[in-house]
């Protein structure tokens, strides 16, 4: 199996894990959203990144000392921006609903997270067959998520979950798009933090684990906005007392969420290594497409589209088909660089 094929398989697993990580929230019924999200933040952003990085990357101090401090500050900045985007996500969901927010966020993130590294790292390849393949794939990703957004909106209306009185739809749309920009900062951190990865390799880290040197500062920086938002919600909604109601079982569910999410992040980083120099460019839209495809299938299998009517489901399948086509185009483009 060549590196590109291995990278694609790893990426598929990463997409499935990322799309599935919120499933345990359905069973944490005694906690409010902010309880679960705070527990997830602690495990996924404060506990697992330092533990995994310390176990897999030797000589961490010398690695960060050997790299230009501006690179580290860039990664930290991208992490903080991503953390703010997570807050915007929660606010957008409250304004326009989960389905529309999810599609707008992933569509914007796929486009921005792909095109910016392409223009910054490989501008000379934009007007080539490979560059055209990337642009075509991104265009299909955008088309697919927009079709899924239409399906999600129709589903919400059918289930009487569309935005009602007191909701600011315009603000929700703006926040969702801003969140999409911020969500792509994870990919920016990996793409522009390449010197950290190279430094980790020189210090003895394997190619599988070298990207952990980027994830550590990025995730720690991303934790701050999430923690502040959760603490604010706990105080506003007076839900801090619910931590004692869920018991160890709810904490275990949050830990499973963290393992799935952070595990998918690690696998995404590994897949970009396997895909070669174009990994962060080709891998990101593939990753976003696989998340939407998997989330759509999980939603159908768990009954989220029940009683929504035939039309929304048909439109959703059309959107998923476009995303599958995008995956094939981007996969073919990646194989040409193996």
Image (spheres, rainbow, N blue to C red):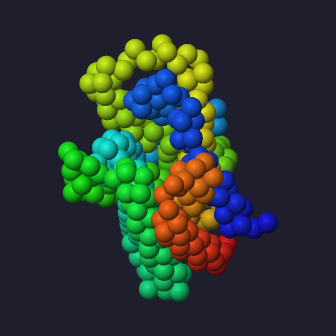
Seen at 37% across and 51% down, the residue is 160
Residue 274's image quarter?
A: bottom right
Q: Quadrant of the N terminus?
A: bottom right
Seen at 64% across and 32% down, the residue is 55
The number of callouts visible is 0
Query: Could you tell me residue 12's position as x and y percent?
Result: 65, 58
Residue 223's image quarter?
A: top left
Q: Is residue 74 visible?
A: no
Query: Could you tell me residue 316's position as x and y percent?
Result: 51, 66
Seen at 55% across and 24% down, the residue is 250
Residue 179 in the image: above or below residue 333: above
- Could you say which is closer to the camera, residue 280 or residue 247? 247
Side of 284 relative to 83 (left or right): right
Residue 142 in the image: above or below residue 48: below
Seen at 52% across and 35% down, the residue is 25
Side of 141 relative to 272 (left or right): left
Query: Could you tell me residue 166's position as x and y percent?
Result: 20, 45
- Could you say which is closer to the camera, residue 11 or residue 156? 156
Residue 335's image quarter?
A: bottom right
User: Hey, which residue is sitting farthest right in the picture?
Assistant: 1
């Amino acid at each position: 199996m060549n590196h590109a094929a291995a990278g694609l398989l790893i990426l598929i697993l990463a997409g499935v894990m990322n799309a599935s990580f919120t499933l345990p929230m359905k069973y944490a019924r005694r906690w409010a959203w902010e309880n679960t999200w705070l527990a997830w933040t602690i495990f996924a952003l404060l506990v697992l990144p330092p533990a995994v990085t310390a176990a897999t990357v030797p000589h961490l101090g010398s690695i960060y000392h050997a790299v230009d401090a501006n690179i580290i500050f860039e990664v930290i900045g991208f992490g903080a921006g991503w953390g703010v985007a997570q807050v915007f996500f929660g606010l957008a969901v409250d304004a326009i609903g989960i389905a529309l927010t999810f599609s707008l966020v992933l569509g914007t993130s796929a486009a921005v997270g792909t095109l910016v590294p392409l223009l910054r790292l490989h501008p000379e390849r934009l007007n080539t067959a490979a560059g055209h393949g990337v642009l075509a794939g991104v265009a299909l990703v955008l088309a697919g998520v927009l079709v899924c957004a239409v399906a999600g909106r129709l589903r919400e209306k059918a289930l009487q979950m569309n935005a009602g009185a007191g909701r600011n739809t315009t603000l929700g749309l703006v926040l969702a798009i801003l969140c999409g920009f911020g969500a792509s900062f994870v990919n920016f951190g990996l793409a522009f933090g390449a010197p950290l990865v190279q430094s980790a390799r020189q210090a003895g880290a394997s190619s599988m684990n070298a990207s952990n040197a980027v994830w550590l500062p990025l995730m720690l920086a991303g934790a701050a906005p999430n923690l502040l938002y959760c603490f604010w919600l706990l105080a506003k909604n007076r839900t801090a007392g619910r931590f004692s109601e869920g018991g160890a079982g709810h904490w275990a569910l949050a830990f499973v969420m963290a393992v799935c999410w952070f595990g998918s992040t690690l696998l995404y980083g590994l897949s970009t290594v396997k895909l070669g120099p174009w990994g962060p460019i080709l891998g990101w839209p593939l990753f976003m497409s696989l998340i939407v495809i998997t989330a759509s299938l999980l939603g159908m299998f768990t009954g989220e589209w029940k009683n929504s009517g035939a039309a929304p489901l048909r439109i959703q399948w059309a959107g998923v088909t476009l995303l599958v086509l995008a995956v094939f185009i981007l996969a073919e483009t990646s194989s040409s660089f193996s």
